[in-house]
Amino acid sequence: MKKWISILFWVTFSIGACVLMAFANSRQNDASVGLPEIEIEVTDHMLFLTKDQVMQRLNDRNLIGENRIYVENDISAIETEIQNMPEVKNVNVYSYVSGKWKIDIELRRPIARIFNLDSSSCYLDEDGFLMPLSDTYTARVLTVNGFINETDMGKNVPAIMNNDSLKTIEILDDLYAISQYVCSDEFLSAQITHVFINPYREFELIPRVGDQRILFGDASHVKGKFKKLQYFYSEGISRAGWENCDTINLINRNQVVTSKR
């Protein structure tokens, strides 16, 4: 008899628990979630995307709404939509037990601005991805012009580096190697302000101080060439003199060649 009572108790308990869970889920699904809280991580005040812009883009895609309920809130679709925004590096969308939900966004950080042959312009970020310009912020970064025309925002350096055919025809990966090195070095980032790409796909650097041209050549031996340049600035330029120097040639691997005015 006691055994049957025990079985009946657990059956009743299980049914009751299932009913309560179903009721709770039903109430949660019908609960209003409202608009999300948005947190944007910004590097060096580079606010290329505002909270209002994120809200507007999601609203345009009918992914958010003040009267939206929990069951209508497609977090996966929202996260995918934001991740595909060219200004966004990482995004995390999640909800709390209370029903409130939040969007955490990390923005991309540009290291160079490209001025294309067709007069358009875009940024190259620290991970090798292209970014469009922003209506809210203009970054003070290394500028690039010359024989370059990067207009495909879907292009990126990691994809080029993993494709031997693309590496032979693209110049974006070479530009990235030079820009990244300049921006990661305190002295060079203060000294080098502009890169020109000539018709032979060779790089020329323009310093902040003086009006010399630095003939860098192609992107081979990037580290070695910049080390030569830094040594020349610390030792050689004092003997050559800024006013006498017209070009600084780093193309030859083992020497720095200068030409006078």
Image: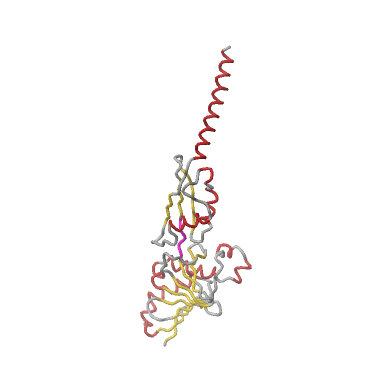
Residue 143 location, x and y as percent? 45, 72
Depicted 153 relative to depicted 33: above or below: below
Depicted 105 relative to depicted 155: above or below: above
Number of numbered callouts drawn: 0
The colour mode here is secondary structure
Secondary structure character of the magenta stretch overall: strand
Residue at 47% from the left image edge and 70% from the top image edge? 113
Quarter containing the C terminus = bottom left
Q: Is residue 129 left or right of residue 47?
A: right
Picture quadrant where residue 232 is located: bottom left
Which residue is the extreme one toward the right?
Answer: 165
Q: Nearer the viewer, residue 58 or 184?
A: 58
Residue at 48% from the left image edge and 40% from the top image edge? 31
Q: Which residues are magenta?
A: 106-110
Quarter containing the N terminus = top right
Q: Is residue 116 magenta?
A: no
Residue 131 location, x and y as percent? 50, 65
Residue at 49% from the left image edge and 74% from the top image edge? 115
Which residue is the extreme one toward the bottom?
Answer: 261
Residue 129 location, x and y as percent? 52, 63
Residue 182 location, x and y as percent? 44, 69
Residue at 56% from the left image edge and 62% from the top image edge? 158
Q: Is residue 109 magenta?
A: yes
